[in-house]
Image (spheres, rainbow, N blue to C red):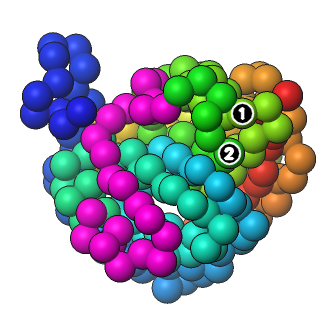
């Protein structure tokens, strides 16, 4: 469903200024190591896949040919237009659609994998997004995630709490203080792998805690 035709209350909040900035930010992030992270995230994924919050489609080039069908959900108009251009060059079949994380365009138990890549920090209700992922995944289906997360250091976490209101306002709704792995477990997933590391996505930014992992639907 295109957001321009969605009924009242169904339109996702647009962040056109941040979206234009993010096109460059994501490119720099990949030059600084993000490309390797994306490859690690998607290694071995197969079958029918849904990527939630696909941005401009920078993951598309890294999906292996074992993926038979990829639906890429992106609510932001600017990023979705860029994702459609990237989809035309992907080596797997990609369909880019508008939509929101709390209402995924798939039937119950119909998908082999759901991918969240640098998006659970910014969705308004991550618990609802993960509940939707659980709904559309088949039993044993995979949740792949790559996110920046709350610091394990007490002072670091408190600092993230303090800056979150301004950070979210300037950064398209991003919340740097979310304990995403705990939220995934609370949604009923078994976390099979979670690799934690520091990474500075752009110059002059201190390394932030990130995780790349795989969870399965119980």
Q: Classify residue 210 by image quadrant.
A: bottom right
* Location of residue 82 with respect to 166 vertically, above or below: below
Q: Which of 55 and 26 is in front in this view?
A: 55
Q: Nearer the viewer, residue 142 or 170?
A: 142
Query: What percent of the width, then of the height, locates residue 59?
Result: 50, 67
Q: Give the alpha-carbon distance from disc 2 to disc 1, as whole Å.
A: 6 Å
Magenta stretch holds residue 85: yes
Q: In this view, does 19 lie to the left or right of 106?
A: left
Location of mark 2 (residue): 112
The single residue placed furthest to the bottom in the displayed view is 31
**Magenta segment boundaries in residue numbering:** 84-106
Q: Residues within 10 Å of mark 2 (few under 14, many from 20)?
A: many
Magenta stretch holds residue 78: no
Disc 2 is placed on an element classified as: strand
Query: What percent of the width, then of the height, locates residue 143?
Result: 70, 44
* Location of residue 51 with respect to 109 vertically, above or below: below
Magenta part, dominant SS:
loop
Q: Is residue 147 visible?
A: no
Quarter of the image containing the C terminus?
top right
Residue pictured at 61% horizontal, 73% vertical:
65
Q: Can residue 121 be seen in this view?
A: yes
Query: What percent of the width, then of the height, locates residue 110?
Result: 61, 34
Q: Is residue 124 left or right of residue 194?
A: left
Location of mark 1 (residue): 138
The single residue placed furthest to the left in the displayed view is 4
Residue pictured at 25% horizontal, 46% vertical:
76
Quarter of the image containing the N terminus?
top left
* Location of residue 195 with respect to 153 vertically, above or below: below
Disc 1 is placed on an element classified as: strand
């Amino acid at each position: 469903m295109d957001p321009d035709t969605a009924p009242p209350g169904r339109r996702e909040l647009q962040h056109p200024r941040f979206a234009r900035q993010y096109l460059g930010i994501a490119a720099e992030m990949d030059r600084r190591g993000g490309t390797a992270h994306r490859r690690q995230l998607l290694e071995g994924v197969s079958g029918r896949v849904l990527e939630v919050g696909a941005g401009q489609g920078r993951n598309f080039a890294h999906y292996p040919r074992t993926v038979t069908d990829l639906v890429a959900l992106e609510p932001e108009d600017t990023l979705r237009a860029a994702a459609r251009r990237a989809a035309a060059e992907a080596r797997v079949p990609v369909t880019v659609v508008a939509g929101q994380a709390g209402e995924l365009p798939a039937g119950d138990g119909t998908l082999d994998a759901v991918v969240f890549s640098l998006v659970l920090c910014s969705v308004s209700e991550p618990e609802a997004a993960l509940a939707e992922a659980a709904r559309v995944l088949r039993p044993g289906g995979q949740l792949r995630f790559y996110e920046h997360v709350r610091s394990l250091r007490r002072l670091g976490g408190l600092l993230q709490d303090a800056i979150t209101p301004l950070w979210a306002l300037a950064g398209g709704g991003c919340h740097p203080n979310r304990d995403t792995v705990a939220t995934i477990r609370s949604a009923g997933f078994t976390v099979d792998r979670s690799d934690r590391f520091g990474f500075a996505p752009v110059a002059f930014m201190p390394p932030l805690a990130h995780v790349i992992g795989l969870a399965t639907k119980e």
